[in-house]
Image (tube, grey):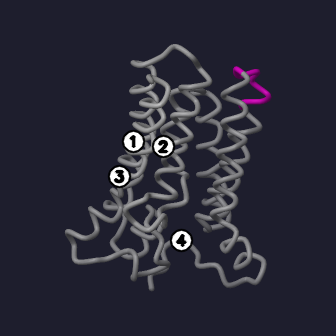
Amino acid sequence: MRIVVAIVAGYLLGSIPFALLLTRSRGVDLRVAGSRNVGAANVLRTTGVMPAVAVMLLDAAKGAAAILAARLLTDNLTVVMTAGLAAIVGHVYPAWLGFRGGKGVAASAGVFVMLAPLATAIAALVFVLTIFVTRFISAGSIAGALALAIATLAGNAPGPVIAGAIAAALLVMHRHRDNVSRLLAGTERRIGLRL
């Protein structure tokens, strides 16, 4: 029963749509504005830097909260990792938004900062440097997700954490497939551009 509660709690925490809630108070509905994605990058594009930073922090916090909640219920690392993945899935596919949520980057950061802090720091550095060089948030997100998976593997993290990092990276890349197409076509929007 505790396993089920941990995983369900992870999903519910992850599915809190902070981006939508924060921008709605400013008169913006992310589902019809900008890229129509309910995530921090679209908040940056439509609402500005400070709201985007707030959303990133809140999305990371809900990933971390899912891990904390799971640890209160069990010492089983596989279950804790599964609850973390459930939070990421909840962020990406929230039931109350028609399963159309964000892309999982900040939520993943919150999950893995609790389980593999050094690997997460490396991934964050890769994320920032890639954005600085390319000016594409999507490129930074993909590079950061790949770096997280590689860093957990290279750092000999526990098996469930490595598997979780790989799963999270695959999900993040899947959610960025349209961005990859635009990057290849030369039509992806650079950071700082608004619609």
Cβ–Cβ under 8 Å for marks 4 and 3: no
User: How many residues crowd around disc 2 within 10 Å: few (fewer than 14), some, or many (20 or more)?
Assistant: many
**Kind of residue at disc 1:** Lys
Say which of marks 4 and 3 sits in front: 3
List x then y, in percent, for residue 54: 33, 53
For mark 4, what is the residue?
A: 191
Q: Nearer the viewer, mark 2 or mark 4?
A: 2
Look at 65% across and 32% down and name the residue there: 119
Q: Mark number for residue 16? A: 3
Which one is earlier in the sequence, the residue at label 1 or at label 4? Answer: 1
Is 184 drawn above or below residue 167 in the view shown?
Answer: below
Residue at label 1?
Answer: 62
Q: Residues within 10 Å of mark 3 (few under 14, many from 20)?
A: many
Q: Which mark is residue 87?
A: 2
Eyeballing the image, is 29 above or below 74? Answer: below
Query: Under tag 3, what secondary structure?
Result: loop
Q: Secondary structure at mark 1?
A: helix
Disc number lying in front (1 or 4):
1
Question: Which of the marked residues, 2 or 4, is nearer the chain's N terminus?
Answer: 2
Q: Earlier in the sequence, mark 2 or mark 1?
A: 1
Can you give x and y, in whole percent of width and height, for residue 166 in the image?
72, 41
Q: Is residue 61 left or right of residue 146?
A: left
Toward which corner of the image does residue 103 lie, by quadrant?
bottom right
* Residue range corresponding to the magenta coloring: 152-158
